[in-house]
Image (cartoon, rainbow, N blue to C red):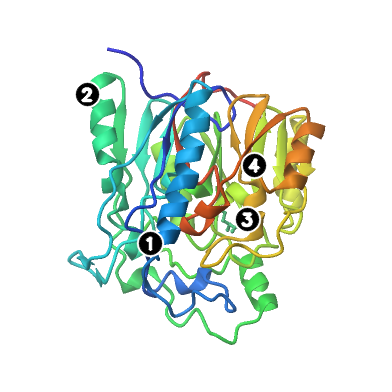
């Protein structure tokens, strides 16, 4: 019997990771929480159904490339078991015409030490996504006697969980930004809802983005569930589509974090880092003007890198400015061609979930 699961942050030496798969990915139909995060001018608006086969194949090639690079560097890689998402799904509270994917495991799985917890996502189409990871969870459970296999309280996602008519085609970018600044999001406070990719783990401290996918009640839930940790709610008023923190605020090693210069990290939130001698550096500009076709994410996936240890970091191969900046910051950037996977739910960090990193739960902000 060995210890399989351990990870407290995103930068200690990575030994074991899950890399997502693109099979059967569907663009979901609109539902209360999703229209908010599809930009008005996106070609995806109003469109739903299985993604074209050749794009699925290319995404899987990119994901396999990442898996191979990791394995060549001695990191053990596991893959989820794809599910046929192109089928209607229902609970006693709702029915949706399809699921979505098992590509970004980072949205679903939160690793906290020897625990991996499936999150409480606010999209109905993602309600059953955790099932793609259950065979792996079961395997870790059998092999590691200390592994804590857990599941956050499942939200019901009834109509009470969303503000109806929150989204309006006419809404301007300025209005969206005003809403972000006023903490006015599409989800209500009816029940705790959160995506694992909104949680930035730094040992004893969790920085959790309050936005379109994670609400305030989730912060309160985290406080009670992890009483030994400090929970910080963070918000970036420069982000008109605030979901997932990993293209906004990305730690590279203890004491160093790259920050999205457009999303305006508030002074108040900066203080705790500066008071503890952390350096906050503006991330290099993205190399691309537009995300690839049918992509939910922004060009800032440029900073969505996968840190292997305090020196080595995987960066998307076409992101020339980010690669160059990594070197200037004393990191050793490893380019991996990964852009074909972006449309399936994000970049290199999104596409993975930690199973094992060396190291303990440190207190970086005492
Ligand atoms: N909202 C983020 C997603 C990051 C994975 C962005 O597109 O910038």
Residue 326's disc is none
Disc 4 and disc 2 in contact, CB within 8 angstroms: no
Above or below for 195 versus 178:
above
Distance between the alpha carbons at the discs numbered 4 and 3: 14 Å
The disc, 3 or 1, on the residue closer to the chain's N-terminal end is 1
Q: Which of 296 and 206 is in front in this view?
A: 296
Dot 2 crowding, Cα within 10 Å, few <14, some 14–19, many 20+: few
Which disc, if any, is residue 250? 4
* Lower position in the chain sequence, tag 3 or tag 2: 2
For label 3, the crowd category at 10 Å Cα-Cα, with few meaning under 14, some 14 to 19 and many 20 or more, is many
Q: Which residue does the numbered mark 1 point to in the structure image?
A: 53
Helix, strand or loop status at disc 4: strand
Q: Earlier in the sequence, mark 1 or mark 2?
A: 1
Judged from this view, the residue extending furthest toward the right is 328
Q: Which numbered disc, 4 or 1, marks the residue that appears first in the sequence? A: 1
- Residue 142 marker: 2
Total label count? 4
From what the image shows, is residue 125 above or below residue 175? above
Which corner quadrant holds the N terminus? top left
How far is mark 1 from mark 2, CA to CA?
Answer: 35 Å
Secondary structure beneath dot 3 equals: loop
Q: Nearer the viewer, mark 3 or mark 2?
A: 2
Residue occupying the point 62% across, 62% down: 291
**Picture coordinates of residue 86 (x, y %)?**
27, 64
Q: Position of residue 272 (x, y in %)?
A: 71, 38
Mark sitting earlier along the chain (4/2): 2
Between the C-alphas of marks 4 and 2, the distance is 33 Å
**Mark seen at residue 235:** 3
The answer to whether residue 357 is seen in the rendering is yes
Q: Mark 3 or mark 1, which is nearer to you?
A: 1
Proximity of marks 3 and 2: CB atoms separated by less than 8 Å? no
């Amino acid at each position: 019997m060995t210890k399989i699961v351990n990870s407290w942050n995103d930068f200690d030496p990575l030994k074991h990771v899950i890399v997502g798969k693109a099979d059967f990915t569907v663009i979901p139909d609109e539902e209360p929480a999703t229209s908010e995060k599809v930009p008005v001018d996106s070609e995806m608006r109003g469109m739903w159904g299985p993604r074209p086969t050749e794009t699925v194949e290319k995404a899987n090639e990119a994901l396999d490339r990442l898996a191979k690079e990791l394995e060549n560097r001695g990191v053990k890689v596991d893959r989820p078991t794809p599910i046929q998402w192109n089928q209607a799904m229902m609970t006693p509270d709702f029915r949706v015409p399809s699921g979505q994917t098992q590509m970004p495991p980072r949205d679903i799985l939160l690793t906290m030490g020897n625990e991996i917890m499936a999150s409480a996502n606010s999209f109905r189409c993602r309600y059953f996504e955790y099932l793609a990871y259950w065979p792996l969870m079961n395997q870790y459970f059998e092999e590691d006697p200390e592994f804590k296999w857990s599941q956050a309280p499942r939200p019901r996602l009834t109509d009470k969980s969303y503000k109806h008519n929150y989204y309006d085609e006419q809404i301007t970018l300025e209005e969206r930004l005003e809403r972000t600044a006023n903490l006015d999001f599409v989800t209500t406070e009816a029940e705790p809802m959160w995506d694992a990719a909104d949680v930035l783990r730094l040992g004893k401290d969790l920085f959790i983005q309050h936005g379109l996918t994670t609400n305030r009640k989730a912060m309160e839930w985290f406080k009670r569930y992890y009483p030994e940790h400090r929970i910080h709610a963070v918000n970036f008023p420069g982000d008109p589509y605030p979901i997932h923190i990993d293209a906004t605020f990305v730690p590279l090693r203890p004491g160093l974090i790259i920050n999205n210069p457009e999303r305006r990290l508030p002074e108040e939130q900066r203080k705790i880092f500066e008071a503890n001698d952390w350096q906050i550096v503006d991330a290099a500009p993205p190399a691309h003007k537009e995300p690839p076709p049918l992509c939910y994410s922004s060009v800032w996936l440029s900073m969505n890198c996968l840190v292997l240890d305090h020196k080595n970091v995987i960066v998307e191969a076409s992101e020339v400015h980010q690669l160059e900046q990594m070197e200037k910051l004393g990191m050793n950037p490893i380019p991996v061609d990964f852009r074909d996977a972006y449309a399936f739910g994000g970049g290199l960090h999104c596409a993975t979930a930690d199973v094992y990193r060396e190291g303990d739960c440190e207190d970086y902000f005492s």
